[in-house]
Image: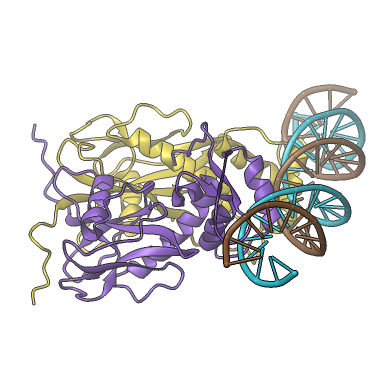
Chain colours: A purple, B yellow, C cyan, D brown
DNA sequence: CCAAAAGTGTTGGGCTTACACCCATGT
DNA sequence: ACATGGGTGTAAGCCCAACACTTTTGG
């Protein structure tokens, strides 16, 4: 009674790629790295790499995100969204990549090189530079998933610090969905959902200060 | 300038599993096989198996569906929906399975054994028997995805033959979503969507014959 | 007092839900 | 004639989209 993989079991390289989004300058940005080694040396790519033995997929995604970019903050959201396994997607051989979607909170903008990475930086998610491998397709699909998740779960809050203003929240929606929204309707809708609590304080800046909110205690993010 | 996988690239077994749904007896059914070999010999499981060298993932899913069940009809819908890669999900070693959702048309009910399969058969999707490996979790996630897709794309039509009646279509909705719907509201909604064309004929049976419909010419299924 | 951004209500249309009876056919 | 399933309309509530001016602060 052997319990080894049968001889016909195809062995492939198992990788993860991470599409990490954050807000910066009222724009949705995606985290990219410049590759150090072949193939695609000096090209921009999504952070990612091979899974370690005995390592879970989401752990590998987290590790790659952190080591390749020196982002040591916890992502506020991390989920697998699609698996890319086309036969010739990697010139080195058959590599299957489980792509993950990550949301990093506001302020996580400073990134540095590390690992196989020359540089790392944020780029406009809707107008990315040319990317290595099939990473452009991965990014497009991540954007679609993010847009669906934004309204379905309340992922928008994950882009913001603990307290935030309604105009800031609206900016997240507009940046992710890539369209302007009406201020009054937006407020009505969000406030009536009861997932925000006014925190009483006010933030200063140019113009009239805005009411600060935090997420209500009972807010659940749906599992899927 | 070598272009081989780096030594640290983890090699894993690459498999696909297929959750194939069809309607039978006004119920949503899922296609299961009884495994011939270890592990989990004589247990019920989803059809699936290892990807072949140089084979695309969706092709592998189609092949496994056909060889393990003698279902040689083309599925009307086949899409990847999640990848299961937990370290210990397979006692034989690290196996990552890209799970696929398939919809088979009405009438595809006769299935036979084949390959590593002792028997194959249809089981109620909402009350499945105990399943091998993590296949219960895979089925649950497939059901969720199917429910989302049903309304989003118009997957319901894929369960039916070319011509069908509105009560038949409603039965698909009710079986997939697992709840009763109002007949008049259902008709209003579906007909106002303009994706159905009355085909004039009528089908005979017990009671008043029903109007037959077919899908309208311009109907598109969204890519994702 | 001016610039800048925050805040605030109403109306109309479309969509969804709830609900009960008659119709066409086969036996 | 009756059993079986198919087919039909209306009214109420809810949600969404459109739309412009006032308020609060800093400079």
Instruction: Identify whether B3 is placed above or below A63.
Output: below
Percent position of residue A149, x then y: 49, 50
Taking depth in this image into account, of B204 and B189 the one nearest to the observer is B189
What number of labels is visible? 0
Q: Is residue B152 left or right of residue A142?
A: right
Give residue B53's position: percent from left, percent from top: 19, 61
Q: Residue at x 17, y 66 (%)?
A: A93
Question: Can residue A217 be seen in this snapshot?
Answer: yes
Image quarter of residue A142: bottom left
Quadrant of the drawing holding the N terminus of chain B = bottom left
Residue A218's spot in the image, x, y percent?
A: 52, 31
Percent across and percent down for residue A4 are: 10, 40
Tell me the quarter of the picture where residue B63 sits.
Answer: bottom left
What residue is rendered at 26% in x and 35% in y?
A: B35
Front residue of D14/A190: it is A190
Q: Is residue C10 above or below residue A218?
A: below
The residue lying toward the viewer, choosing from B147 and A155, is A155
Horizontal side of B115 relative to B194 (left or right) equals left
Q: Residue at x 44, y 38 (%)?
A: A223
Residue B213 visible within the image: no
Instruction: Out of B114 and B20, give the one closest to the viewer.
Output: B20
Which image quarter: residue B222? bottom right
């Amino acid at each position: 009674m052997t319990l080894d993989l049968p001889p016909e079991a195809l062995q492939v390289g198992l990788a993860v790629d991470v599409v990490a989004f954050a807000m910066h300058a009222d724009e949705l940005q995606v985290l990219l790295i410049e590759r150090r080694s072949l193939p695609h040396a000096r090209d921009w790519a999504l952070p990612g790499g091979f899974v370690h033995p005995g390592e879970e997929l989401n752990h590998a995604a987290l590790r790659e995100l952190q080591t390749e970019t020196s982002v040591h903050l916890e992502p506020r959201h991390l989920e697998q969204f699609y698996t890319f396994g086309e036969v010739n997607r990697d010139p080195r051989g058959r590599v299957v990549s489980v792509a993950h979607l990550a949301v990093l909170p506001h302020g996580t903008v400073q990134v540095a090189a590390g690992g196989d990475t020359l540089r790392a930086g944020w780029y406009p998610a809707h107008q990315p530079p040319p990317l290595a491998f099939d990473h452009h397709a991965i990014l497009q699909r991540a954007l679609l998933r993010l847009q669906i998740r934004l309204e379905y779960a309340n992922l928008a809050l994950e882009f913001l610090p603990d307290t935030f203003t309604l105009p800031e929240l609206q900016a997240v929606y507009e940046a992710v969905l890539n369209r302007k929204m009406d201020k009054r309707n937006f407020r009505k809708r969000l406030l009536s959902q009861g997932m925000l609590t006014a925190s009483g304080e006010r933030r200063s800046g140019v113009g009239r200060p805005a009411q600060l909110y935090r997420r209500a205690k009972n807010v659940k993010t749906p599992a899927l």
